[in-house]
Amino acid sequence: MSERIIIFDTTLRDGEQSPGASMNLEEKIQVARQLERMNVDVIEAGFAIASEGDFEAVRAVAGIVKKASVASLCRASKRDIDRAWEALKEAKKPRIHTFIATSDIHVKRKLQKTHDQVRQAAVDAVRHAAGYTDNVEFSAEDAARSDVNYLCEVIQAVIEAGAKTVNIPDTVGYAIPDEFGNLIATIRDRVPNIDQAVMSVHCHNDLGLAVANSLAAVQAGARQVECTINGIGERAGNASLEETVMAIRTRQDHLKVHTDIRTEEIYRASRLVSGITGILVQQNKAVVGANAFAHEAGIHQDGMLKDKSTYEIMTPESVGIKESSLVLGKHSGRHAFRNRLEEMGIELTDDQVQTAFVAFKNLADKKKTVYDEDIEAIIAEEILRLPDKFKLVSANFTSGTGVVPSATVEVEVDGKVKTKAEFGDGPVDAVFRAIKKICKSRAKLLRFTVSAITGGADAMGGVTVRIKENGYTIIGQGAASDIVVASARALINALNKLEYRKRTQETAEAEKPSL
């Protein structure tokens, strides 16, 4: 029987470190529930000491997850470890994940310590963590660029100190697959007590090799892979969970291992994370991209009609992509709407269902049919939003040939409605100018993306904006059948997130790691 690979998901921690991809508490809970529905083995819920918001998110996820281990990252510091445990202590299966860098460039230039000091700090951290739980993971940051002899010494020492998982990160995505596989094999050969711990890998995608490096490590003996939904994360991102898992499933004949992931939940997880973070999945992305199971070439179509396996190495159904969707319309009742939410894996309270249902009926009056994607947009728009300082009351605009585009916008600010009229280069620009003046915002618009959430002339439009102010990069989203209104909602959403970030950010935020 093949050996099992442990899937460690760090979407809520490393994935959230994607610029502008911060999630609020309710959004993190929604993602955590989906990860558990997928049967992920370990959920890294955050970096508890980084901020009060991260601490509360780790504690909240630890309280709702029943089967998976819940981990919090912490530096090799007693203060970090104590804070992590405080957030994790109610979890069914808590894991403390502590780390320190081992490469020469990090030891000498970043940490400004000696190799002996770093090794001792790693041992002390693991021992301290082991006083709380026997589920301790140690990561040697920048392991791929570390001296292998020193790396083996540190790994041996932390296992002796109580680490049950040792993680070998390719922190900067520098490794090449055969090189990284050889590193894992060398550690297996040289560390005498390596059989007392699970060897893990955490690969970044700077050279587009994160999944390939992870699979090379698995072939060399690693038995835990750290990854994220859609591959989001620092810089170019992390190893993609869906690609890693489906490669293992599809090529089990070659890799001789398996995972316990419910692959039919993969697409749902991808859509959820994309919707919450505003990071769109590229159309040609493996497994979950819009074109992953699309065939246009005549030869391909002919082959597919005769036998799907001619051009598909996995089925859409195996990752949760359905060829048809249940269509809801204005005559659908509350019971049918709630049933559809349950089928989509969206868990809401009765009050939240009522709020979403009212929005659904309003949309259904404007459209002939309402699709799953419309419902996801409604949930993002009406349920997962942060407490609002700003609320869009109305937006009226004029535009056309020979007319200077203008807009009159009403926004409720802390309960008081304010009105502003502005001209612009177009109706969206005019609306944005009015909103920014009402909200007294100096935010710079970095990116503006429009997409049709569903097909047809009455398609619901989705707008994603990326803004920057005072060093904060924020993503906002809005959806409406009118694209200008959707744009206004997206900017208001971003400004609300910006206000929330300003309120909750600690004066001296702890350093965020990049394993």
Image (cartoon, grey):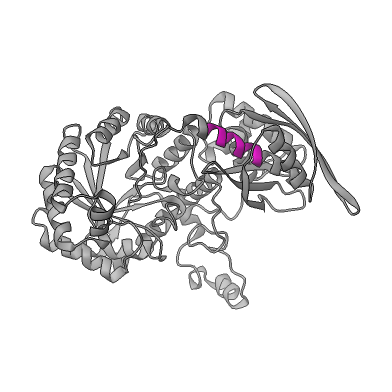
Judge whether residue 331 can be spotted in this image: no
Residue 497 drawn in magenta: yes
Q: Residue at x 73, y 41 (%)?
A: 433
Outermost residue toward the top?
415
Q: Position of residue 152 (x, y in %)?
A: 14, 58
Q: Where residue 120 appears, x then y in whole percent?
A: 14, 45
Residue toward you, 376 or 403: 403
Using the image, determine if residue 128 lies above or below residue 483.
Answer: above
Residue 401 in view here: yes
Q: Is residue 466 left or right of residue 131?
A: right
Image coordinates for residue 438, horizontal then vertical, percent: 71, 32
Among all residues in the image, which is located at the extreme left?
192
Query: In screen coordinates, is 212 left or right of 461?
Result: left
User: On the rendered image, what quadrant is the N terminus found in?
Assistant: bottom left
Q: Nearer the viewer, residue 371 or 432?
A: 432
What x and y, as percent, mark residue 383? 58, 32
Establish if 355 lies above or below 296: above
Left or right side of 12 for 394 = right
Which residue is found at the position 64% from the left and 23% from the top? Answer: 414
Q: Is residue 273 magenta?
A: no
Vertical arrangement, residue 380 with respect to residue 312, above or below: above
Picture quarter containing residue 170? bottom left
Q: Please provide the residue range marked out in magenta.
A: 491-500
How would you classify the magenta stretch by its main secondary structure? helix
Which of the two residues, 299 or 192, is positioned nearer the viewer here? Answer: 192
Say which residue appears at 59% left-offset and 75% top-offset.
302
Q: Residue at x 60, y 29 (%)?
A: 388
Quadrant assignment, res 379: top right
